[in-house]
Amino acid sequence: MASKIRSQEKKSSELPWLPLKVNSKHRFFIDLYKMDISEETGASNVIKIHLIKVEREERKMLTRSKTSARILVLILAVATVMAFTPLTGWTQEAYAGAVTVTVNGIDVSTHAYWKWDSTLETPTYVEGTSENYNIHYSVDNSGVVDLELKDDDHFTSVNISYANCLVKLDNAKINSTDSSAITCDGESLTIQMAGKNYIMASASDENTNNSYHGIICTQGAINITGTGSLNITARDCAINAGTQLTIQSGSVTATSTNYDALEGEDVSINGGRVVANANGYAAIAGFSSVSISGGTVIANGTGASGQGISLGMMGTGFSITGGAVYSYGGDTALKSSGPVSIDSGEITSNTAAGYKYVTILSDNTGKAKLAYASAEKKPNGLLNIGSLEFIANQTGIDLSNVYGDYSDAAIGVTHSYSWSAQKTNDGYALTLNNAYITDGEVSSSGTDGDLTVDLIGTNIIDMSDLSDLEDGGEASAVESSNDITFNGTGSLTATSNPGSEFSQSLFIEGDIFVNGPDVTGIGGVSATSIGVNADSIIVSAGSLTGIGCDFEYNGTEVKNLASGGIYAAQGIDATGGTVTGKGGNVSIEGGTEQAAYSYGIILGGGDNEEATTVPVNGNVTGIGGIASGTAYGSYGIGIEEETEGTEETEGTEETEGTEETEVEMYISKASTITAVSAKDGAFTNVPKIDSKLKTVVKTGTEADGSDAVVVSAPDESTYTENKYVQITTTSAPVLINLPTNTNYGVTLDLTDLNGQNNSPNATPGQDYKGKLDSNNGFGLPDKISITVGGTALTADQFTYDPATGEFVIPGKYINGAIVIKAAGSNTNASGVSFTKSRLKYRITKPSTHAATVTSKSATVRAAAVSTYGEVTVIGPVKKTYTELTIPAKVTLNGYVYKVRSISAKAFRSNANLESVTVGKYVRAINRSAFSQCIKLENVEFAGKDMTYIGKNAFSTCAQGCEFNVPASKFKAYKKLLLASGLPKGAEIIKY
């Protein structure tokens, strides 16, 4: 389409401008034809027809139908020619001449290959070869122009005159400041995408009348296809088709800052992922028809007059027969003069006006169903697909069925889709089928159910372009409050967005199970970047890979950088599969106390901080990247040794700090564990290996292992001072010949424990079952040892439940006298965790008081209180509680403890919690302790000892949350609360 024109100076050889309406398209544009007769040249006169786009205000005056207008134009054109043409012969020419294709103002049709040469004084494109080109131009036998733009960010504009054209975008960037980015004057334009592509069309001078479309085909159709992505931002339309606009596949994000985002005579979306954004206009506008039969469509028309999807006044059809459609409009979500057909039914009797939020999903037959419609509120669901919620238990949706973006245009009875989801008895089930998600995370955060993800084909969740999100700009590509299981034979590559402080691609508060597919999590650019973060990782088949980002920082605001591939608090079991963690290359300069760290895999910490061993088995590899700074560290596999909490110092003051918990990595099965450091040691700590395993250790001083040799007697330096260490363990089957007609005695070698009615004899071939009980003040041990006939059984040759003390020795192993050896665990020790009532605690200071004192003497009671130990609250037993009271003290095996603190993230994502009472002795609430407790609206502080409230402890609780504090501590508590960050409308009330 030609540039916008407000006025035009007449020339003597031209006819006056004719304000003839040849197209009536509600709200959007009116086309004018201009005709002139040039001076006679030779035997022919020339008629030139110009298509002019006029301003929005002028369009409102022109309202005739397009059929009558076109007839009128034709009559006037013929009459004008006859009036001004001599009787000599003439021919009609519409910009006659060869087809021209220009890129950056250069006619590229003169050569097949061009390459950008930035080494020239004035950078321009020069002739290249088929190996190093950025532009490839050709014309096929039918005359269709084939233009390829690839691997460059210096493109400024593309113009194709009067030709059908195929434009291939392959990791290309076009930034136009003087005109539209891609303009085609032919009958059709096909955009084929590969990789990541970007288009920007913004006016350097906002007063100019030039058009600034992202892609425009003035006369004909535009077809979008391919497997890549395309991100377009334009002042005018992001994509403007003269006739048909079709999107078949790939991922398209279109944003218009001053017009409709996607516009065409007919708009058809058959697949792929389409995100359209406009402010004050329509996100998607079709003049004659709009049809959606597949894919995921997200339309956001913000502003008071914004519309999500709009059909022109003369439109003939608005139908949604498949796909997933999320539409929002500040004025209305779906604008149509007639009915909106959803699976042959209407959303309303005659119009969709009045609904600002509309969600439409397809069921497992491929037919569209209305899931949600509201004039006021955005739907709140439990499973987020992209940045918009999958609706739970709303009218029109039965989650026992499968819903997603099924295509009604599928072949036979099999409907294709890029994603589908449903609620099951175990949680939520999501299927990704060659999905390409770029606008937001896939999440089941805040739910009680687990998430199962089936992967088909190649799936991508790429948030690397989302740099400005709410909540500090931090979001994971995949997030779950509980366990997540990946099934299938496909793959998933998930990349989180850049974060201000943290960026974690797969952030799972439970365990990750991988049963077949290949899953990769890539952390975004941030001060702390983690590819995969979970409690435990279990890969029975397939692979899980975590990758931390590369990051260079030169400044003083950031104190530390950390890039880790995988964080697994409670261990890794890759028996049957593979787990790989790769830390990025990080460097930091500018300060005196700044440090950079790169880890392949980090173990320990989290909710498992009290553990002494973290299991790692199977095929596991950790690779640390290059780290540099005032302080630095690069390790293949590291142990998290510090836990957050409070510690008591001498005197009367108590300060927040850390306490160390010694943790060992433990290999108990046949495995191949490889640790690689780019700079320091392969391991931070010496791994513990089960003595029953046959072990071979190879080490090398080179990170690639090229000089690795077998070490006959490995010591601490073997693991911590070599850059490459590979541990291979194997086990042989145990063969026991069973005797007959005899019994064997059973001896209990116990400390602080006793046996409960255990039989003194065991019989070969029959299971021996027993039970242990702990003495007062002690707990059951985590492990016991059993020898039979002088040979120790391995942990997988008998069963033991540390929760009940019950154990079973299979009869096939009973061939001699049995000795069961165990010691009760001292529960009155730092780091011990236990459960009381609704809460989980961890001891931070042992108690010296073994009984509750009930004396009437204040002196006696005060002396007893001084002997109390201390605990921190580490979480609730369940996340379904609506009310919780944190007590002043708790008792374990006769010992008494003050409840002194609440650990970081202790109640994170407890979505049902509404009210909390903080106990009398609590003095510290650590960071994010109640983050994402979205219903928490009342917090009462029962005591006067509070000295610390960490960052974001309550910031994401319910708006208007009330904090009730003692009157004598009002100023101090108010200062602590405000400094930590509070939700909008929060009130601090003294009592």
Image (tube, rainbow, N blue to C red):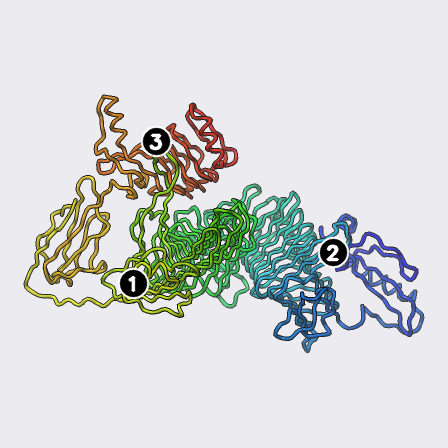
Residue 588 is situated, as x and y percent measured from the top left of the image, at 51, 52
Left or right: where does residue 60 sit relative to residue 925?
right
Q: Eyeballing the image, is 895 above or below 204?
A: above
Q: Quadrant of the C terminus?
A: top left
Q: Residues within 10 Å of mark 2 (few under 14, many from 20)?
A: many
The residue pinned by badge 1 equals: 714
Q: Earlier in the sequence, mark 3 or mark 1?
A: 3
The quadrant holding residue 922 is top left
Q: Nearer the viewer, residue 342 or 278?
A: 278
Q: Is residue 398 visible?
A: no
Mark 1: few, some, or many residues within 10 Å (few <14, many ≥20)?
some
Task: For the residues labelled 3 and 2, say whether their Cβ atoms are less than 8 Å apart.
Answer: no
How many marks overall?
3
Mark earlier in primary sequence (1, 2)? 2
68 vs 537, left or right, is right
Which x, y percent locates residue 576?
34, 65
For residue 651, the mark is: 3
* Residue with the most extreme right position: 86
Mark positioned earlier in the residue sequence (3 or 2): 2
Secondary structure of residue under mark 2: loop
Q: Amino acid at mark 3?
A: Gly
Q: Which residue is mark 2?
A: 211
Q: Amino acid at mark 2?
A: Ser
